[in-house]
Image: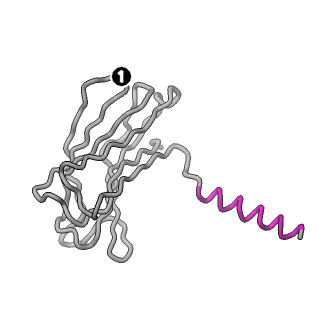
Amino acid sequence: MKNLFIFLFFASSINWLACTPPSGVFEKDIVLPDQQWASNFRPTINFTIDPADTSNRYNIYLVLRHTDAYNYNNIWIRGTVKQPGDTVQKSERYDLLLATNEKGWLGSGMDDIFEHRVEIQQETKFSRPGTYSFTLEQIMREDPLKHVLDVGVRIEKAP
């Protein structure tokens, strides 16, 4: 009985450690309704920067998952950031390359689902502590944009 308890303790400890995200990484993905992204659906992702983290640099990625039936080699996304204490938002357009005719889908895939992590900013410094808001909007001609499963943001401490 004692050996069983010790085994269960170590097994649960290893399982807990395996599920803990690595330090210095934030990622949040928003599932899109009905596997399509309407232009009026603009998910907002909030993340908080602690005062101690304002001296660090970060790499920022847009994360996108889609099915093999997605019709384009790219996607245009407008990202809008609101910094803590600001009333003005800053927007930027991103043309994310998802596939080429020579190589096919560039992201990682399993069966007919593909995930892309595309770096949009390298070694960014968040100058103010507090909560930042990042809003994503698809700006493709097709509306709604079909076969898109979810979209999100990943922030990693730069090495």
Q: Position of residue 101 (x, y in %)?
A: 18, 71
Q: Quadrant of residue 114?
A: bottom left
Magenta segment: does it hold 3?
A: yes
Q: Residue furthest front?
A: 34
- 99 left or right, relative to 158: left
The residue located at (71%, 62%) in the rendering is 12
- 146 left or right, relative to 7: left
Which one is nearer the viewer's eye here, 104 or 110? 110
Q: Residue furthest left?
A: 141
Q: Quadrant of residue 124?
A: top left
Q: Look at the numbered disc 1 and give the secondary structure of its residue.
A: loop
For the stretch drawn in magenta, what is the main secondary structure?
helix
Which one is nearer the viewer's eye here, 46 or 120? 46
Q: Amino acid at mark 1?
A: Gly
Q: Quadrant of residue 66?
A: bottom left
Mark 1 — residue? 85
The residue located at (43%, 49%) in the rendering is 27
Q: Position of residue 37 (x, y in %)?
A: 23, 57
Query: Which quarter of the figure is the N terminus placed in?
Result: bottom right
Give the total number of marks visible in the rendering: 1
Q: Position of residue 152 (x, y in %)?
A: 35, 51
The residue located at (31%, 62%) in the rendering is 149
Q: How is the image coloured?
A: one colour
Q: Residue furthest right?
A: 2
Q: Is residue 91 above or below residue 103?
A: above
Magenta segment: does it hold 30?
A: no
The residue located at (61%, 59%) in the rendering is 18
- Callout 1 crowding tier (Cα within 10 Å): few <14, some 14–19, many ≥20: few
- In the rendered structure, which segment of residues is drawn in magenta? 2-19
Q: Position of residue 71 (x, y in %)?
A: 17, 68
Q: Is residue 63 above or below residue 124?
A: below
